[in-house]
Image (cartoon, rainbow, N blue to C red):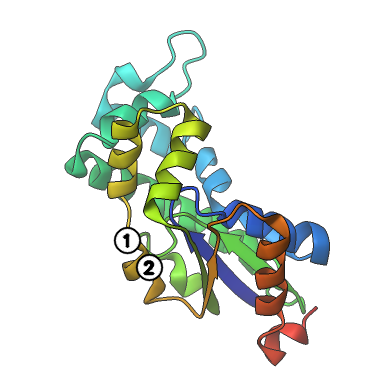
Amino acid sequence: MFVIGLTGGICSGKSTVAKLLHERLGIKYIDADRKAHEVYKQGTPTYYELIKVFGVDIINPETKEIERNALGKVIFSSKEKRVELNNIVWPATKEIVRKEIEEHSKDNVLIVLEAALLIEAGWDDLCDEIWVTETDKDIAIMRLMKRNQLTKEEAIKRMNSQLSNEERNKHAKIIIRNDCNDINALWYQVKKSIHFSQKKSALL
């Protein structure tokens, strides 16, 4: 088994890269951000811990589920609040991801673990190699404004809450640049990268 940790800044194209690897090469794909949704579910220990720390205003009064958007408004306005959230959510999510990887520990497979906060959360120790997608900050801001219907100020605040490209790239074995919204150009980089190592190629 060989695990590629795929990360990158907001709107840098990491999900597109993961999708290409899965759909065109059949590589198993774990979306850590989706796995993180499980720790927010009603009835889990983290659900009650989040309510205790951030209050009942993060709860939908009808469904009783945690509203991610309401929680996001709280944490993106305060570094201290983000730290509190991360200390609750990151360890719980890592355990879910670790168990899924372990299920394939005896298989001769290549796994892509996509995680926006792979480096920050310390999940890189689950991986054999780190890939990073990056794009120009101004391009990422424009994409984020369009995707999430945010103002430029809101988008910049979210961008500034994460690692810079330079900090993230220090951990990378492979860096994939995604500025031009050209899927063929992106696929060329992905295909070249996946065959870069004989070790990975042997698993395909």
Residue indicated by mark 2: 168
Residue visible at 44% across and 23% down in the picture? 67
Q: Nearer the viewer, residue 109 or 163?
A: 163
- Residue found at the very far bottom of the displayed protein: 198
Q: What amino acid type should be assigned to the residue bearing mark 2?
A: Arg
Residue 127 visible: no
Q: Amino acid at mark 1?
A: Ser
- In the rendered picture of this protein, how many numbered marks are placed on residues? 2
Circle 1 residue: 164
Q: Residue 160, how many percent across, how many down? A: 28, 48
Placement of 198 over or under 3, stated as above or below? below
CA neighbours of label 1 inside 10 A, class few (<14), some (14 to 19), many (20+): some
Determine whether 92 is above or below 203 in the image. above
> Which one is nearer the viewer's eye here, 177 or 80?
177
Query: In terms of secondary structure, where does tag 1 sit?
Result: loop
In the rendered image, which quarter contains the C terminus?
Answer: bottom right
Quadrant position of the N terminus in the picture: bottom right
Q: Position of residue 108 (x, y in %)?
A: 77, 79
Relative placement, left or right, of 161 versus 98 is: left
Q: In whole angstroms, how far apart are the C-alphas of marks 1 and 2?
A: 6 Å
Question: Measured from the top left, where is residue 110 in percent x and y?
Answer: 71, 73
Badge 1 vs badge 2, beta-carbon distance below 8 Å: yes
Residue at the location (36% across, 23% down)?
70
Along the horizontal axis of the image, is 25 left or right of 98? right
Residue 25 visible somewhere in the drawing: yes
Mark 2 lies on a secondary structure that is helix
- Please tell me which residue is depicted at 73% across the width and 61% down the height of the picture: 184
Q: From the viewer's perspective, is 59 left or right of 23?
A: left
